Image (cartoon, rainbow, N blue to C red):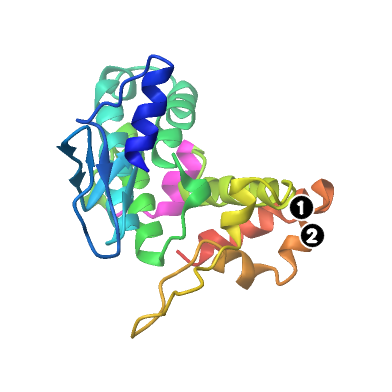
């Protein structure tokens, strides 16, 4: 199939970049080549800014989110640590740092530990902005009352909720709609506790969420409650 894709691309003046063409599979591997060059197998890769992997994918993605958020934070160190009013620093956090921390949150299915890592990262930044040391042991509620920054866990939940409603209202022919309820015919669940699925948070919160999602107004009414519940479990 890859060879067919390469041939079709050449017909319209496009050439497949083999250095960026990789294969990832959870099945048996076999040699696949394009124009005589073998395509490399990988365990993970970055696609559209997110980690794609069969092993601990979410842990790796959360680690990337926090790392990238800190890089952005320190690149604006003079603003965050300077004499700007706290109200402007809050806007910088909400507009520049929060989107990095929650990038791709629409597709997440987080454990409590993963939620905690996001919140710890955000709280550390709040301490840095306020000039507070971790050893000062100031309560998180006091920090938040001062910074009034949007909570990262609640924001991630809101993004997921909005996306879930959007997918439910899509025509069934759309790929996003198909994959939301897709289950491999030959799939067998492995031993041990099953992995968290994308829809598990939604199923637990609201049993008939797919039905409710058909109404935009009803869906919006449940948005904040879902965010609060999602945050309280982290």
Q: Residue 189: which numbered mark, if any? A: none
> Of the residues under marks 1 and 2, which one precedes in the sequence?
2
> Residue shown at 33%/42% (left/top)?
65
- Disc 2, SS: helix
- Contact between marks 1 and 2 (CB within 8 A): the answer is yes
Q: Nearer the viewer, residue 133 or 112?
A: 112
Q: Residue 212: which numbered mark, if any? A: 2
Q: Position of residue 61 (x, y in %)?
A: 32, 49
Q: Residue 219: which numbered mark, if any? A: 1
Q: Nearer the viewer, residue 200 or 144?
A: 200
Please identify the dominant SS of the magenta region.
Answer: helix
Q: In the visual, does 188 lie left or right of 217?
A: left
- Disc 1, SS: helix
Q: Position of residue 228 (x, y in %)?
A: 60, 58
Magenta stretch: give its range: 137-147
Cα–Cα gap, marks 1 and 2: 6 Å
Please tell me whether residue 138 belongs to the stretch shown in magenta. yes
Quadrant where the C terminus sits is bottom left
């Amino acid at each position: 199939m890859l060879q067919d894709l390469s041939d079709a691309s050449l017909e319209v003046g496009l050439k497949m970049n083999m250095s960026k063409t990789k294969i990832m599979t959870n099945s048996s591997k076999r040699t696949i080549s394009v124009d005589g060059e073998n395509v490399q197998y990988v365990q993970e890769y970055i696609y559209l800014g997110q980690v794609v992997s069969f092993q601990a994918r979410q842990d790796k993605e959360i680690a990337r989110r926090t790392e990238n958020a800190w890089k952005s934070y320190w690149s604006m160190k003079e603003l965050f640590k300077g004499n700007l009013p706290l109200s402007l620093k809050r806007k910088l956090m909400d507009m520049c740092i929060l989107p990095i921390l929650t990038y791709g949150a629409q597709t997440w299915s987080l454990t409590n530990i993963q939620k905690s890592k996001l919140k710890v990262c955000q709280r550390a930044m709040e301490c840095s902005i306020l000039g507070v040391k971790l050893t000062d042991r100031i309560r998180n509620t006091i920090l938040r009352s001062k910074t009034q920054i949007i909570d990262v866990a609640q924001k991630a939940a809101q993004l997921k909720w909005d996306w879930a409603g959007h997918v439910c209202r899509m025509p069934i022919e759309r790929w996003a709609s198909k994959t939301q309820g897709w289950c491999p015919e030959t799939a067998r669940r492995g031993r041990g506790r099953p992995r968290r699925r994308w829809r598990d948070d939604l199923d637990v919160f609201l049993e008939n969420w797919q039905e409710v999602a058909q109404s935009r107004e009803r869906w919006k009414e449940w948005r904040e409650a879902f965010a609060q519940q999602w945050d309280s479990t982290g």
